[in-house]
Image (cartoon, rainbow, N blue to C red):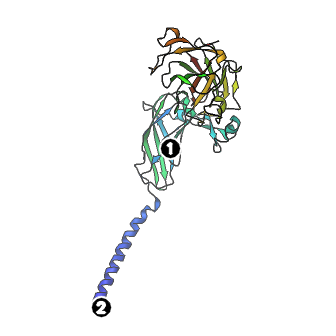
Amino acid sequence: MKKYRKINLTILLSAIALIEILPGCTKIGNGFLSPYVTYAVTDFSIIRGRTATSYSIVTDGSSIPMNIKWTNIYDSTGKIVDDIFSKEYPIAVWTAAYDPTTDNTFASIIAKQKIENLPPLVVNENNGTIEANAGTLNIPLGTYTMDLQVSNSAGTESLKKIMQIDIVDGLQVETAPGSGDFANGRAVAGTAPVTYFFNGQNNPFSYYTVTRFADTPNVFILKFTDRNGVPFDPKTGEIIKRPAAGLNPVPPYLPNLQDYAPDTYVALDTAMYLKYPLVPFPIVSIADGFNMYYNINTAFVQIDSTSAWSSNSAGIFYQGTSDSHYLGTYVNGEYDYSIRVPMRIEVPGSYELTVKILNVTHR
């Protein structure tokens, strides 16, 4: 009998101890907010005018849902510049999912967008990602730091200067985005295979300039000229589509601007013109990178014959008859001139990309 009493006493003491412990455990019922909430990467670089997204916040075990917002932004001198980042600008936003198989016209893309007035930086209130939009084009270049306020059921934490934001300049029109470089070559007139004069970086035969001539509307102009600045005429067939290789290839031609904007493309007498609906444009690639392929009709071009360039340094361009690579000219009427131009618009606005081809003469 004494043995059973001893066991019962042990059980009773254990139960009392457990009861004393349990109330302490229930304190987590109101949630938990860590004072060590942070970002895995605390330096966010933004190319001015482009869309960009930072990493999401690291909650350090804090209870969710959370509410996150920025409270102050400072410039490099420590001055609060909230007014710069609070100002709103008209920004195109999606209202429905983009489908590259059907949304391939200006009208179909615009139909899935609306204009909202937004500040240049928006903090996602749920996960803390910092989302930059085209409004950053209006932000002065420089280094800034941001304070965040994080709240959940357990309370509120102020996170001072938790993120450094670098607003930097970059190309507004990329001419080597993803996979893509200028390439120049010749093809037997009307055929696909190309013998390249040069294919790759630091191309000595393509001297190009990009000019942003207005903030609006969103238009793009592509112009090809000969070495003397004489433009080739797309409207009358001096610039033509480049045939794809193979027997009965599908599609029969390699991609160009007209394929990316079929309903706004216009062939002018000195250039090609289109309206684009958003940035980046093109949205997705329909071939290898964002390359635009063209031929110049053999009837309108005289082509220099040159010795091979195995490589080239940046800023070194072909000099024509005075160049050591010059070997004379090909017989007129035998070859189309083939040119590949990589391009992708990253910042809204009106642009002209002019490509001067240094080893041809308009005729």
Residue 160 placed where, x, y %?
Answer: 42, 42
Q: Decide which of 270, 237 is in the foreground and name it.
A: 237
Question: Going 48% across and 13% down the picture, which residue do you hit?
Answer: 325
The residue identified by callout 1 is 129
The residue sitting at 43% across, 30% down in the picture is 76
- The residue sitting at 51% across, 54% down in the picture is 65
Residue 209, image x, y percentages:
56, 20
For discs 1 and 2, the disc positioned in front in the rendered view = 1
With respect to residue 269, does 146 lie above or below?
below
Q: Is residue 319 visible?
A: no
Which residue lies under the disc numbered 2?
A: 1
Residue that protrudes farthest toward the bottom in the picture: 1
Residue 60 location (% of width, % of height): 42, 51
Number of disc labels: 2
- The label on residue 330 is none
Toward the viewer: 176 or 62? 176
Quarter of the image for residue 355 reads top right
Residue nearer the viewer, 66 or 294:
294
Question: Which quarter of the rendered picture does the N terminus lie within?
Answer: bottom left
Element on which disc 1 rests: loop
Could you tell me residue 207's position as x and y percent? 54, 18
The amino acid marked with disc number 2 is: Met
